[in-house]
Image (spheres, rainbow, N blue to C red):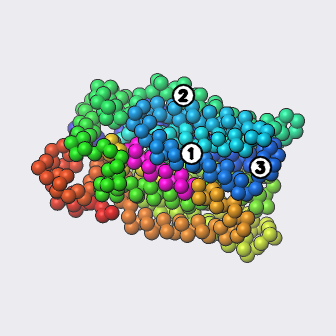
Amino acid sequence: MKSVTSRPEFSKGSLRLHLLCAFFAQGSFLWGYNIGILATIYVSPGFIKLLDSPSASKQGLITAIYYLGTWISYVFLAGPISDRLGRKWSTFLGAIIVCVGAAFQAGASGAGAFAMMIVGRIICGLGTAITSTAVPLYQSEISPARQRGRFIVMNHIGFVAGLAVAFWLGYGMSYWTHGSGFNLSWRLSILIQFIPALILCAGLPFVPESSRWLMEKGRFELAKKSLQCVRGSGRVEEVQSEFDEIKENMEYHQANSISSWRLLFTDSDLFARLWRVALLQFMAQMCGSTAMKYYLPTNFIALGLGKQMSLLASGIESSLKVGCTIIEMLLIDHAGRKTTLVFGSAIMAAALLINGALPLAYPHNMNHVSDYACVVFIFFFSFGYSIGFGPNSWVYGAEIFPTYLRAKGLCISASAGSIGSIIVAQFWPIAMQNIQSKTYFIFMATNISAIVLIVAFFPETKGKTLEEMDSLFTKRSSKHIAGRGTIGLPAKNRMDLAAIEEVGIKV
């Protein structure tokens, strides 16, 4: 019998798997577009006039309040909704909520314009958190072990594609500033995200649900059909073997009462996973990525580029991210998660060093070569992020938790990313106004620290099935296993306690 972790041959099942993961990436596209379009309207004349030339702190609040919405949703809503409705209907609900928030923002007017923007941003944050966790959960749960990284990276490809389309659209709209365009251009930019949202919602009812979620709900026959759909009809024995492994793993966790989210904090093995993913999510924002996403055109303007040229450069930068993330999609299952994370962080640290040092050496845009070098190294930063924290923080988080706690674990961990985003979104414009390019050194230090932490504390997960993740993080005492032997453990993970302790990771 073939191993369930062998590389899948090209088949109808493999084609369906690629198409399904690409289709769900539209949810991430919506997420990226929602972020990118705000960066372009910050420099829109009509938006600036409406909010009476908002200060740096006011812009920071509009940006940061979105992440208050994501934090609330990650902690209280996204996990329970994903576990109750399933991955596909959670994605559906999240997209609808994002559209409601977008409508509030596009309709902002009069004396209450700022308040409507704030409300709209919070609502968008609530919806985005649901979608941004449901999509990688679905992709991880339907993917074969040896290619799981590739399929979850599609989540980030969708995200950066949304950013790119938003920046290009913002660049095009920057020429429509006369007549009705003065007030309509930025509103239309926001409303265009309804198109991918409606396409996504129209298709979701017709795609299969995650087989692991279906098994969790006891719908085993439907789960087997779903698994057969993405593995191919000619792989009956292989599908049965994978099905049995997943089922045994679930029975093992059910027998040990591993179902409450509180165990993520009280069980040492589960907490070992939680703090690692939460730290990854936090560092993924503190590395400087939030600033580059929301304030990219503003950063380019500070380097001497005009408004339209800064939007053009932002479109190019975001388009390059798509290509860089595709490179990561091809690398991640070969080089591994740790290697690409470390390499990406090193590139970002070097790029931030250059952007901090050159403006100090040549202040007030006195040297155009220096300014252009900074622009180029912002592109290098984007490359580092696209092969490192960008996709990996979601890949790692979507694969290391057991099925019963995967949604809760990923959502609670992602809330740490929201905290990081709130900090950066509020801090960046004020810091740039007061200490200018020295701001880059702060985020450079974060990346250097990240390299040390990743090398020291993060085990490699490439090539392992979702059920095999237990062996990486298990250091259970005899009270969890005594009297059970290896009954209930997945067939591929059956080992004695000494072997478990040998591979266990210390918290």
Which of marks 1 and 2 precedes in the sequence? 1
Which is more foreground, mark 3 or mark 1?
Answer: 1
**Count of numbered labels shown in the rendering:** 3
Q: Which residue is mark 1?
A: 69
Residue at image position (47%, 53%) is 393
Q: Which residue is mark 2?
A: 201
Magenta segment includes 413 = yes
**Helix, strand or loop for disc 3:** loop
Find out whether the residues at labels 3 and 1 contact each other: C-beta distance under 8 Å: no
Q: Residues within 10 Å of mark 3 (few under 14, many from 20)?
A: many
Q: Amino acid at mark 3?
A: Val
Q: Which residue is mark 3?
A: 43
Residue at image position (76%, 61%) is 302
Q: Please name whichever residue, 279 or 60, is drawn nearer the observer in this view of the structure.
A: 60
Magenta segment includes 475 = no
Q: CA distance from mark 2 to mark 3?
A: 31 Å
Find out whether the residues at labels 2 and 3 contact each other: C-beta distance under 8 Å: no
**Magenta residues, start to end:** 406-421
Find out whether the residues at labels 2 and 1 contact each other: C-beta distance under 8 Å: no
Residue at image position (45%, 32%) is 88
Q: Is residue 3 above or below residue 300?
A: above
Q: Can you give x and y, in whole percent of width and height, for residue 304 in the image?
A: 79, 61
Which of marks 3 and 2 precedes in the sequence? 3
**Side of 433 where 30 appears, left or right:** left
Q: Please name whichever residue, 121 or 24, is drawn nearer the observer in this view of the structure.
A: 121
**Side of 315 where 269 appears, left or right:** left
Which is more foreground, mark 2 or mark 1?
Answer: 1
**Helix, strand or loop for disc 1:** helix
Q: Is residue 379 above or below residue 394?
A: below
Q: Can you give x and y, in whole percent of width and height, for residue 74 in the image?
A: 48, 45
Q: Amino acid at mark 2?
A: Cys
**Side of 472 where 428 appears, left or right:** right
